[in-house]
Amino acid sequence: MASIQKNQSAFLLLILANMIWGGNFVIGRIAADYFPPITFSVLRWAIAFLLLTPFMIKPFKRDFKLLWRHRWVILLLSVTGVAAYNTIIYLSLHYTTSINASIVNSTIPLFIALFSVIILREKLTAMQGTGIILSVFGIAFILSKGSFQVLQEFSFNKGDLFVLTAVVCWSLYSVIIKKYSQVLPAFSTLYATSFTGLLILLPFCFYELSRAHQPILLTPGSFLILAYVALFASIVAFLSWNNGVSKVGASKAGIFLNLLPVFAVTFAILFTNEELHWYQLAGGFIVICGVILSSRNTLRLSVRPKKAVHL
């Protein structure tokens, strides 16, 4: 019973994270009119870092030796999860729509499953494999607007390719989080990675501002955008995701990322006046079925265990 309740709480955390990140795609698309992408990412994490600081001074001092002992892991998490993923996503939204980006982003479970087998030596269950296939079919159904001919003729634009690069970064982040979830404290790790990620991004930010033709527009709307991405997308969603991954594993948690485009499409319709189409409803239903199917424990696919790979 305790195990079931633990999984249920983990699933709720993973759903919450994806709901917030679904909104982040729509907000990021809107923010493209107000901020250059790297500058937007820096402002997001700078505000998040400042919001965390009053609560994190004592825990960070307490955990500093442990974090320093795993400094290369912290650096890798900072590069993949903080500096690279979000910045590349915001860059992609200057070239593609929030719906397109969120759909391409849904290939993350496939990469997480691959990296989990390689790095963590996890085993995929038959149900998880079936759920992945079903979820990908649902995504393809949305992408093709229910037309096989459209799917055959589909070609990626530059923004979609940027999203694929971000997908690889986030998949690595998720697998590393799982590997060290019992070693690194969640809050102190988020605090350390947000600061390190900021240091990594700052030189790129200065370069962008020195060459960018797009000015920073400071309006009440842009401040609300920054508040959303800093508080919810940077803190609440990250902590929910990290805790969910540590409880159920990277492969199973990755399946929940297929909910992200469902939320993104819904928010895009509600807040950008886009129309709701039948294929979006049908595809979203298929994706949710895949998520539910993938959360079940069944027979495992055969993968021979090997020695753990240490980062």
Image: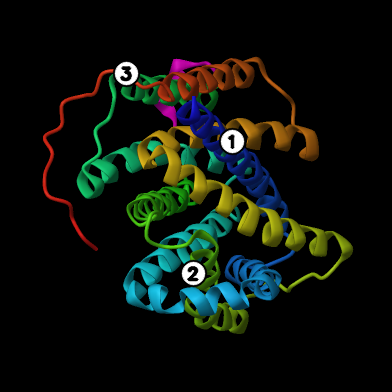
Q: Under tag 2, what secondary structure?
A: helix
Query: How many numbered marks are there?
Result: 3
**Which residue in the protein does label 2 denote?**
193
Density class for disc 3 (Cα within 10 Å; few <14, some 14-19, many ≥20) is few
Residue drawn where x is 50% and y is 17% of the image: 289
Amino acid identity at mark 3: Thr
Residue 14 is one of the magenta-drawn residues: no
Q: Under tag 3, what secondary structure?
A: loop
Residue drawn where x is 24% and y is 63% of the image: 311
In the image, taking residue 98 as reference, residue 268 lies left or right, namely right
Q: Earlier in the sequence, mark 3 or mark 1?
A: 1
Q: Under tag 1, what secondary structure?
A: helix
Boundaries of the magenta span: 146-156
Closer to us: mark 2 or mark 3? 3
Q: Earlier in the sequence, mark 1 or mark 2?
A: 1
| Image height of 247 relative to 258, above or below | below
The numbered dot on residue 298 is 3
User: Residue 221: percent from the left, percent from the top?
Assistant: 84, 59
User: Residue 237: percent from the left, percent from the top?
Assistant: 61, 50
**Which residue in the protein does label 1 denote?**
15
Q: Is residue 107 visible?
A: no
Q: Earlier in the sequence, mark 2 or mark 3?
A: 2
In front of the other: 2 or 113: 2
Calculate the distance from the C-alpha at mark 3 to the C-alpha at mark 1: 22 Å
